[in-house]
Amino acid sequence: MELPCVGDWVTAYYYNDDTAAIIHRVFPRKTFLRRKSAGEKVDYQMIAANIDTAFIVQSCHFDFNPHRLDRYLVMAADGHVEPVVILTKTDLILRDELDEKLSIMGAVSKARVLALSNVTGMGFDEFQQVLTPGRTYCLLGSSGVGKTTLVNRLIGREAFHTKAVSGTGEGTHTTSRRQLIVLSQGAMLIDTPGMRELGIVGAGDGVNAGFEEFAALSSHCRYANCSHEHESGCAVRAAVEHGELSEDRYSSYLKLKKESEFHEMSYLDKRKKDRAFGKFLKTAKKQMKD
Ligand SMILES: Nc1nc2c(ncn2[C@@H]2O[C@H](COP(=O)(O)OP(=O)(O)O)[C@@H](O)[C@H]2O)c(=O)[nH]1
Ligand SMILES: [Mg+2]
Ligand SMILES: [Zn+2]
């Protein structure tokens, strides 16, 4: 996590006619997006730093999934990044279906929801108006939802940036590549490859911020450390029973909270073990020297 990632501000020393540079210092991050690294290993992986707004992109078609949106919202909240939801490929569904999907997304979060089509151009102007000069944006979402197409559409009008992007082989390099693009109007945008696994970390804060209505109710639970599962006097469960909170969102909340706590615990545990092992090596080396 300490290593520089896309979006970081650094001090660097250029050499070899500015073809290479050494990074001396990474400045503290204002915000960040991170996930649990893929696979069994418990570790964080930085996705981007100093992002003002994350565009959480889902397609209206196959990719539409409110539970996945929950995950991204928790991830954004964990890193203090403002979320904006974008539904793409509106050309593939009927207006009625779109309205229904918009209201489902609206119920999941208070975040702004935009709908657009890269094919017809519907919603594109509204999207462009969101982009503010000097602010940094990051596109998040599954592979194939139209993130890169959207970026190309944005820079397509500006030959200079198109060249800059294609010149570095965007899309042809490894899929783990992340690049910050400066739009001519002054906003900065980072495209990311699709993430198949989105393990969340950061127990507590991120999940609570992603599920604001639960956090607000928690303060009315009888016990301060209420898990909202079986304790008596639980305000969250009461709200679910009275139909004020959806059953579905409640189970999503518990699931993400547990997962997040589990990852956080394993991570801290691993750090402890790593430190212990480091100490062991140091002592062993010293003994050998002696
Ligand atoms: N019908 C439709 N297809 C789209 C739209 N946006 C992107 N696509 C197509 O979806 C596919 C994946 O797009 P891409 O930008 O690579 O997705 P990414 O993986 O999120 O970057 C491509 O074949 C695009 O042409 C859209 O708004 N409508
Ligand atoms: Mg892409
Ligand atoms: Zn409770």
Image (tube, helix red, strand yellow):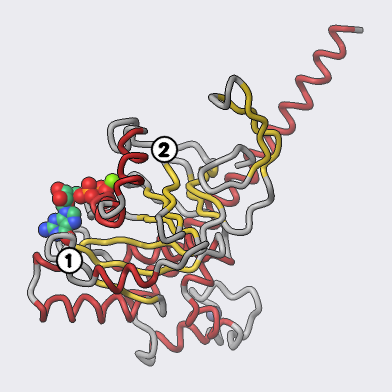
Which residue appears at 58% of the width and 85% of the height? 221
Q: Residue furthest top?
A: 289
Q: Quadrant of the N terminus?
A: top right
Q: Nearer the viewer, residue 241 or 175?
A: 175
Helix, strand or loop at mark 1: loop
Q: Nearer the viewer, residue 287 or 93?
A: 93
In this figure, which residue is indicated by the disc labeled 1? 121
- Residue 247, position in %: x, y? 34, 78
In this figure, which residue is indicated by the disc labeled 2? 39
Helix, strand or loop at mark 2: loop
Tally of numbered tags? 2
Q: Quadrant of the C terminus?
A: top right
Q: Are marks 2 and 1 in contact (CB under 8 Å)?
A: no
Residue 109 vs 170, above or below: the answer is below
- Residue 234, position in %: x, y? 53, 84
Circle 2: residue type: Gly
Which residue appears at 64% of the width and 40% of the height? 2
Asked whether the viewer can see residue 99, the reply is yes
From the image, state whether disc 2 or disc 1 is nearer to you.
Answer: 1
Give residue 145's mark: none
* Position of residue 64 in the picture relative to residue 136 (left or right): left
Residue 113 vs 49, above or below: the answer is below
Q: Earlier in the sequence, mark 2 or mark 1?
A: 2
